[in-house]
Image (cartoon, rainbow, N blue to C red):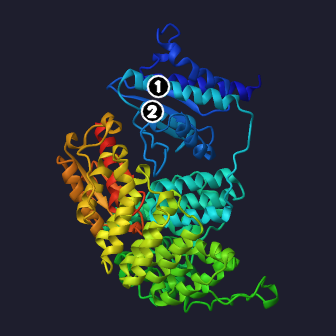
Amino acid sequence: MTQTQEQKREALERFLHRFFGPGNGVWPDLDPNYRYKDRTLPFVESLRRGDDAPVVLPRVYTDRDRFVVYVIAREPGERAKTAELIRAFAGPTYVAYDEQVGIQPAWLDPDDPVEQAIHDFAGDRTTFRLETGRTLDHRRNLAGALELMQRTQARRPPRLWRVAKPIGRLLAEFDASLSAGAEAASDVVLDHLAAAGGITAANLANLRIKRLDRLGRSEEILQFPELPDAIRQDPPVPVKEAILNGVYAALEEPLAEDDLSAARARLEERGRFVPALLDTDAGKLGTQAVTVLLMAATILEDLPALRRLVEAVQSECRIGELPSLIWEDAQRVLAESDGATGPPAAAEPVPQVAEDDASEAFPTIDSWPTFLAAVAAGNREGQSAVEQRSWTAWSPPAAHDAALAGFLDGLENQAAEEAWRAVGAFIDAVGYVAPAGLTAHAFIRNAVAFDRFGPGDLAVLQALAEIALRAAPSAQNYAELLDEIGAYRSRWVSPERAAIALDFVDRLFLAACPDPEARAKLAYDLLEPLWRHQGRLNEADLAFAKRLSRELGVDFSWQDRVGSEGERELSLSDLPPMKVLLYSLDDAVLARCVEEIKQLAPAVDAAKASDHVGSAQLRQKARSADLVVIATRCAKHAATGFITQHARTEHIHYADGSGSASMLRAAVTGLRSAAVGR
């Protein structure tokens, strides 16, 4: 046995003794004389043998009546495969989970000695925490199913796990699901990309950084292991902005207190990567990122960079967006430099690329029409515009709505498939302001034509439908839109995907209705499968389905309570007093979610927020919340990062969509999790 193997064996034994140490009563200290060790021994032996199967380790909490089983993927790239194995062998029979978002890895508690041991052994986001009913039979059944999973997987011949979808489509799904707020779906797509190969480690790291930025997890960006390598590879502007946003989170508090010296000290402490980003085009960055660059250029007295930044801010009339003390400090350094050295030297001419060096001729991409044409043609400049978010500097899609819709509808199959790469950018660009309804409708026709009905696709469809309905379509367009949404409902409406179906129905209620008959028909078509299988709905989905049925006049007889599958969970009406903060840019969604929480869980105090930037009031709400629920679609990083930075709870959940039902489901899941942790 080599020294390396010996070290691995010793590390494994240290992990096992930590796992079965304080906090875990299932096999105390791996005592060889423990009378119940045979129940756990097969899982430990599988790990020691190094079987080609996920690690399975049970736990009985020593301070409360709680049993969980941890399933650990062998490699981060095998998370999607591991989730599928859990679903296949344990599934909804022994493990309760949300079919819409699938079985997701757990966020491990650093204050829990058992979970910290897992983290040190396996790293972040490779572990699934599974729970079942409280009876001994429930626990034995779950353990037996997972033992069978291990044995079956270990006996199979080795095989390569590859995803059938091409990389381009997976990248499009990632961008689209991220823009539509499908947090869980975007994570699953990342796993598929890692498993599929064909994408460099640097590009995969860029995608992970973008996702963390969208979730407002600034601290995780700065601690990301691949961050130094990502910066050395000169990443796209959105990735650079995500890194700068992460640094800004560390400066936010002293800047709010006008403490320049403390802010500078924080930047020097947390911003070691910022000097490598000073050449980033400030015109494509948000206020937080520009603030960090201005501070860094001022501290380093990098006059060329400082002048470029100042000129960019002045030319775009953004001075008022910046903290006054940062702008004044930059002006001071420039004034002192100009006074000491005379006028600045003329900038060196930028070398021009000869026409012969251009790989292909294509019109300059400077608007949505030229952008969509380039993407549909598979032009690399179009792909670059997607990655660099060049569209942030253009007139919004609404300015070209009819032309864009006509262009999309006229594409042949291959070009239409390529054009879907732009749907995430489109959703981001429209946001919650001027809708481009015709273009959104054209993208919906594209989705239906190409059978885009996966979890992430459905969140995108819901976002597109919201944009199209908000644009006040004519009665004819309204009826056509609703007919297209409902035409293939049998492929995706089910109790496991109830939240997304309810999001669609909820949007019908919130939007103006030029054709009541078409609205009633779609509401009936989407609610009817849920009504037929209402015994499989969870408490939140059942309550919201009843509400929508009543509001839209769809006459179904709903049961009063959830069926037996929900009885293993604590009733929402019995939840203890807690405070929950709901964040979304859609005020109507927030209001409806708050109303439902008050009905379902009277002891819970639900607060809502839709701020675009941090504020004292938002800070107080975040700090006092026992649970935070965030809808990330088109969310403002200045607010989401602010919330996650100031939240004192570990219970931060993300809605897998942007509708009322998605947010309510995330809130209910989070409330139960927070209640169990008490």
Q: Is residue 231 visible?
A: no
Image coordinates of residue 398 in percent, x first then y, are: 45, 86
In the image, residue 639 above or below residue 39: below
| Residues under numbered marks 1 and 2 in contact, where contact means CB atoms less than 8 Å apart | yes
> Does label 1 or label 2 sit earlier along the sequence?
2
For disc 2, the neighbor class at 10 Å (few under 14, some 14 to 19, many from 20) is: many
Image coordinates of residue 366 in percent, x first then y, are: 58, 88
In the image, residue 654 above or below residue 77: below
**With 484 as the anchor, is 379 left or right in this view?**
right
Residue at figure coordinates x 39%, y 54% from the top left: 529
Q: Residue lying furthest left in this view? A: 602
Cα gap from disc 1 to disc 2, whole angstroms: 7 Å
Which residue occupies the foreground of this view, 113 or 326? 113
Residue at figure coordinates x 68%, y 32% from the top left: 52
For disc 1, the neighbor class at 10 Å (few under 14, some 14 to 19, many from 20) is: some
- The numbered disc on residue 7 is none
Which residue occupies the foreground of this view, 221 or 664? 664
- The numbered disc on residue 94 is 2
Residue carrying label 1? 141
- Residue kind at label 2, given as amino acid type: Tyr
State which quadrant residue 25 falls in.
top left
SS state under label 1: helix
Residue at figure coordinates x 29%, y 42% from the top left: 562
- Residue kind at label 1, given as amino acid type: Asn
